[in-house]
Amino acid sequence: MSKSIFGQKPTDKLPVFPRRKFIVGMLAAGAAGLTACGDPQTVQVTATPTPMPSLTPSPSSMPALPPLAPKTYPANHANAMMAMDELIDHYAKVFDSPSNLIHAVRSFGRNFKRADGSNAVDHLCATCAEEKDVNGKRLVRFTRFNVEVHDNSFLKTFIEAGVHADQQVLASGNKYTLKDVGEHAKSLFRLDPNNLGKFEKIYTQEHLPWGLIAFSYLMPGGKGSWENAYGEKIDLLEVIDKSLLELETVCQPAHKAYENNEPIPEDTFRKTIKDYSCYGGHSMYAYVACVKNGYTERRIKERVTEQLNLSVYRLVKEGENIEKEYAGAASGPISPNPQEEAMYQQQMQRAGVTKTQVIEMLSLRGVIKLTGHLLEAINFARLNNLYSPTPDQQKQIQHGEQKLFEAIVKMRALDWEALKNFNAKQVADNVIALGHASRAMKLMTPENPDKNPKTI
């Protein structure tokens, strides 16, 4: 059985590698469906890999957009913001996929328009919901697989963007509202605080953060509780407490490194934190949102502050790990199998890209994903007066921001059209990483895409 950098055998067509299907410095394998935030880890390649649906640009009914030519900018805040806006706006419209559109809403707010001028929120609410029957109750939700990806991610994004509670949502020809989606999300939510993997092994890593954000907005004040459609009582504070404890346990080796001013450990921390979506950045943001919405008992606020301190340290130290991973991937062949190697080289030549360019794109995205998500949590906490960095931490934050700016302008200088011809899915995933980085940098400016979210 052979292994390649891309984690699958080449085909006679240009490959569209599923997210989380690369090894050492590429994307990891694991989920059968497409995920919004995959992380690199070593995987075994099956002899006959399961084909994944290819990502195609927007439907023919949508206006065709001219290619976005590469541009080179100096690495500063203004140029990084301009570069991100150009890339997100263009490629969210080109791909017109639910994941790209929801991340454009994350970056630009609830009024983001698709290529044909229609509102992205209206489009997602009209096309991405489904009904589910549980114990005689018909409930509406946004479809997870290949659409929403993470439970409640559309719901919480709409809440924070200030989408009105009466926003119409369509499913199976029936009309609902966003308020219905929120209430039904509570009914569908299942998690045992004393056995976090009871109903779904990876739920806390891949799905819980978005629910915590949504539910803490829906039930502010620190006392949220309800009975779900399965007859189980949910105590939101208990869920927050126990899931945060799990994250704290995972982060202990990193905290030790932070206390001793040492490098972020690979074997004892990063291999585990990669199980959490986007290096744990979504989890960090979720706990900040819970504190913002009043869930502070059981020392939740103090514990979240400790995690924010670690996040600031990770901004400075962890990008080094990512760059080393991708540098290692660049040093060898794509595949130890000569026939596979030749096929990959032919595919890249046909698309007009090199292995070096592909790995550079992935390395830059890794840095953008890490720093963008951590800064989003840190700046959200600062915006809501929940976190006050020390002068030394301010310098570390500035260091992380500059690292982000440099990665973004380098990303803008890449030939995205050629990379898209080689692997459309990976280019679409760049938009997702940039969406969070964009919001991170806009939160504390007049361009903040949040619209004073209200409880729905």
Image (tube, rainbow, N blue to C red):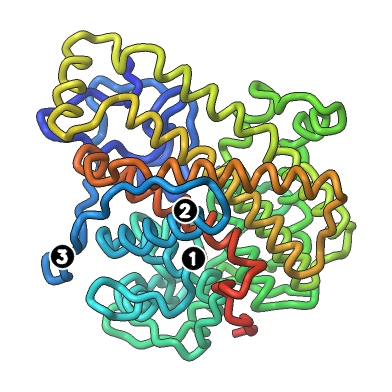
Residue at position x 62%, y 45% in the image: 402
Mark 2 or mark 1, which is nearer the start of the sequence? 1
Q: Residue at x 17, y 70 (%)?
A: 62
Measure the alpha-carbon separation of dots 1 and 2. 8 Å
Dot 3 or dot 1: first in sequence order is 3
Q: Which mark is residue 434?
A: 2
Q: Amino acid at mark 3?
A: Ala
Q: Is label 2 in a helix, a strand or a loop? A: helix
Circles 1, 2 touching at the beta carbon (< 8 Å): yes
Residue placed under numbered mark 3 in the picture: 64
Alpha carbons under labels 3 and 1: distance apart: 22 Å
Residue drawn at x 30%, y 24% as measured from the top left: 355
Q: Give how far across and how far down residue 403 sits, in percent.
A: 59, 41
As helix, strand or loop, the secondary structure at mark 3 comes to loop
SS state under label 1? helix
250 and 116: which is toward the camera: 116
Identify the mark at residue 4; answer none if there is no mark: none
Left or right: residue 369 versus residue 422 is: right
Task: Identify residue for label 1.
Answer: 107
User: Tag 1: residue type?
Assistant: Ser
Horizontal and vertical percent position of residue 333: 32, 13
Tell me the quadrant of the picture where the N terminus can be found. Answer: top left
Q: Position of residue 429 (x, y in %)?
A: 38, 48
Q: Is residue 382 above or below residue 247?
A: below
